[in-house]
Amino acid sequence: MPRTVILMTLAGMTAILQPGCGGGTNTTTQPPSLTIATASLPDAFAQFSYSQTVSAKNGVAPLTWTISSGNLPEGLTLASSTSSRADVSGVPAAVQAGVAFTIQVTDAKNHTANRSYTINVNGVASAQLQDVSGQVPVGVIEIQGLSPGFFNPAYWQQNTLNWVPDVRIPMLAPQTTGPYQNIYAPWPLEEPIGWRLFYGGWDGSDTPNDRVYSITTNDFLSFDHRALVIDHGAFVHVNNVNVQRLVDGSLHMICTAYPDQNNLNKPAYFSSPDGITWNGSPQPYQAQLSDLASIQGYAKFQTGNFNGANVLLWDGQTWTLYFSNWNDQGPTGTMYRATTASLPAFQLQGVTMNTIYAVQDVKIFQSGGKNWYVVGFHDNAPTLWYSLSNDGIKFNKENVLFGSLASGVDSFIVSLGFVTSGSQLLGVVYGAGAAPTLDQNRIFARWLQKKAVITDSSGAQMTLQGGYGPDRQWFHGPPSGSLQGTIAVYSEDGVTPLAWGSVNLSSGNAYKLSF
């Protein structure tokens, strides 16, 4: 658990040396006053720093003195000293708003001064865990209620996001109905109830031709209605799917199709009024050359290679196509932008940003009265990237989103799709594999979640196993099967404190967080 310092500032603590007290030196210790400064600090689950100065009247050196804890909260220690400084430190097991403790100062003549303090930590709620039903593996403690809040651009700008790998590695594997098993390019489309997860590849097929499939889920824990949506038809491959849903329920899909008349990759467009019929035919629709899109005003379109880098976005007013042409990159790479009011004939608008990475998804959120566009990139490498914009026309320089797992099972990340729920960005699903041939991919997930730190009464932290869907986390239970301790909850930026509380947990159980 991060240990941010809360400073305790002491004023008026002096040791005044006077004659008297049986012919010896009399020391009078004035009680200190205490202020806890929290306004500029991000963390209330804190390591305390305590210091005080003992001075002497008329320049006489102070007598030896000690400092004792009285009733410090469990987990804090108070050091004795013969100098003018003492420290309170440690990770408290029971420090929250309203907790009181006492500091006692004693000099060599056994004169004492006591002072009681109450910790006043603003903005930190009381965390509570309630037992809930559900199947939890043996040796695991499940905490529910950890999905992120509304999209917060400050967290993305600070780039401290708390990405939690899903415990299922992979989250979704290809079917074993045929010899070709290689799925990737996931696109989670938010629906009125749940999501429809589109993806491309070889889903247990008899031939190594990329096709577009879909599967439905209400929670990313279970999946149903697995189906072939777009067959490769006149092409060898149709993949890298992304889909927009309008308020009338119609779906609009852009994919990469290969080859066109020039043996190159081009964007292809498919539409559906109901998610069942595509381009006028029931799924699986057989893709045709006539489904290819066009970009007017872009002279290099016919000779362009648009493999896996074409994303369709509806912003409520305009259709926008973000794309890269790998035959038109230059030394720093280029992502373009084209728009239209009539799909699939686009009009080039210009360069959006210089980047060597492949654009995979663009989402829009509103925060603070502004639009925030989030774009995700990949590079067939162990890292994903993102960038932000307030207008969708010019994007800032990309930042690292996250990297592959230490095990290397997802070392080659070949695609991504943001998982959204209204104004929340819940996580990322991505296609990846361990093989540089990029033909053994599976679909993995990282969840953007609140950070939970569970500590037992001895101060040992429970090990996080990973996320289980967008709202849950699994922790390795203690060897004894149960623990008493504390839980500290931070926002999805991983550093902003939200809540703290005492807990009594047992392995094999699930708990719902509230605060």
Image (cartoon, rainbow, N blue to C red):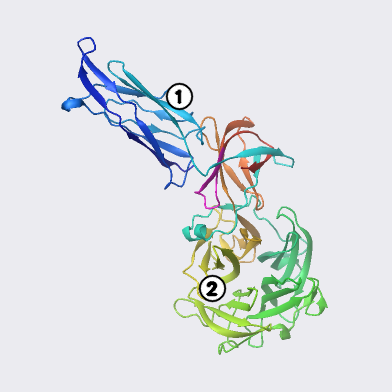
Element class at badge 2: loop
What span is colored magenta in the figure? 489-500
Amino acid tagged 2: Asp
State the residue position of label 1.
71
In this rendering, would 282 be left or right of 491?
A: right
**Residue drawn at (57%, 65%) of the image:** 436
Task: List the single residue furthest toward the top.
Answer: 22
* x and y, in percent, of residue 457 in the image: 54, 30
Label 2, label 1: how many angstroms apart (C-alpha)?
Answer: 56 Å
Is residue 120 shown above or below 42?
Answer: above
Please indicate, yes or no, whether residue 334 appears anywhere in the rendered image.
no
Sequence order check, earlier mark of 2 and 1:
1
Element class at badge 1: loop
In this rendering, would 416 be left or right of 179?
A: left
For disc 1, the neighbor class at 10 Å (few under 14, some 14 to 19, many from 20) is few
Taking depth in this image into account, of 383 and 194 the one nearest to the observer is 194
Amino acid tagged 1: Asn
Is residue 336 shown above or below 368?
Answer: below
State the residue position of label 2.
391
**The C terminus, quarter of image:** top right
